[in-house]
Amino acid sequence: MSRPDPIVEPTAESDAGRRSTSVIADSAFIGPVGARLHSVVRPAEGQGPVVCFIHGNLSSARFFESVFRSLPPSWHLVAPDLRGFGRSAALPVDATRGLGDFVDDVDRVLTEPTVVPAGRRVHLVGWSMGGGVAMAYAIAHSDAVASVTLLAPVSPYGFGGTKGVEGALCHEDGAGTGAGTVAAQLVQRLVDKDRTAESEFSPRSVLRSLYVGARTKLSESLEDLFVDEILLAAVGDDHYPGDQRTSEHWPGVAPGVRGVANALSPLYCNLTPFADVAATWPVLWVHGTEDLIVSDHSMLDLGHLGALGVVPGWPGDEVFPAQPMVSQTRAVLHRGEEKGGTVVEAVFEGCGHSPHLEDEAHFVGLLEPFVESAEAAGW
């Protein structure tokens, strides 16, 4: 592992509402160059909990830096860049494993003693796709987990193409999900490294319209940072969005076997066993009422877009309804509660897909006592 210079400026003493630390975070790398993983790490100034933040699709670890500045200095904080994002190597994604490749990335970081203190249980915080990775990690490595915070998480049934709270596939081949449903214009603008807002498919426009709610306006410097981080994503059949297949079912495309968007398809992504292991430790679920990405009427879900007439040929509610993403998550977490688990649901009014960015103080105010309580209880 190497630790170059800090990748962000020191926290100013005058930063209102934030704890002053000498360095916000370090940049840490593990593994050989061709397969190295990068993490943002803020070492603890004490013996507090170890907390791992897992970013979402088309983002990076740096989307958590502001939150890092607001958390107690006694906490050991780490946020990996998943493969193909941020400064990690563009390793291929085997979509048939669901989110398994990303789970392996997180495990490589959390079991590296130069990055995370050995022998410590970890409190997971997963955002969007990272929420799915957190659930998958907890399923695979339940003994290593102390608590799980799900931050606007993907449904336990994956993204798109399922019916009802039970998550039944609309089509057996997963048609209407995966890489073929991603806007080609967005993919091209990622390839072109477009930093403008000239198109609704420009990453900057997508950041403004989908990542945050309508009431949130990011500062120019923060927006520039996030656009730059989005543009670090590896693009292609092995990465984002992945490969695709044709289908006899509406809308004529089905997920391939490679890449990020396919890994999120319900054809491969099933996180419902999280209900069984969630009885072991507490879960905090945070989401916003104005989330346009993960909701019961997602603006990225072809079932909902078909009903709106945006995607022609929609076969109707009986065949391909909007996926009730939030309701599916609630149902799975409720099953965990029935098995003896503790679930705290926090709904942020007027908030979009990024509660930690849109209402940081509220989010930190919930996360801090939740983690401290779980740590004190010895989960």
Image (cartoon, rainbow, N blue to C red):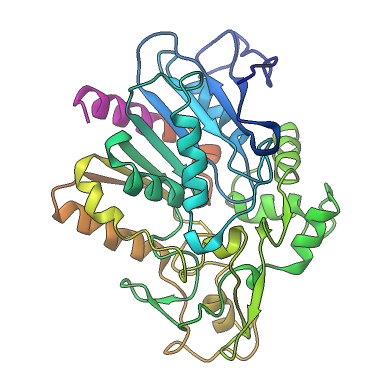
Q: Quadrant of the C terminus?
A: top left
Q: Viewer-proximal residue, 58 or 349?
A: 58
Q: Is residue 371 magenta?
A: yes
Q: Quadrant of the N terminus?
A: top right
Give the main secondary structure of the magenta stretch: helix
Q: Is residue 83 magenta?
A: no
Left or right: 89 in relation to 305: right
Q: Is residue 361 visible?
A: no
Residue 82 location, x and y as percent? 58, 42
Q: Viewer-proximal residue, 350 or 277?
A: 277
82 up-or-down from 368: above or below: below
Residue 332 location, x and y as percent? 28, 60
User: Residue at the spot x=20%, y=26% of the render?
Assistant: 378
Residue 263 location, x and y as percent? 53, 61
Q: Is residue 22 visible?
A: yes
What segment carries the magenta color?
A: 365-379
Left or right: 296 in relation to 327: right
Q: How many marks?
A: 0
Write down the quadrant of residue 223 in the picture.
Answer: top right
Residue 70 location, x and y as percent? 49, 22
Write down the quadrant of residue 262 in the picture.
Answer: bottom right
164 up-or-down from 376: above or below: below
User: Residue at the spot x=55%, y=22% of the render?
Assistant: 41
User: Residue at the spot x=40%, y=70% of the render?
Assistant: 324
284 up-or-down from 300: above or below: above
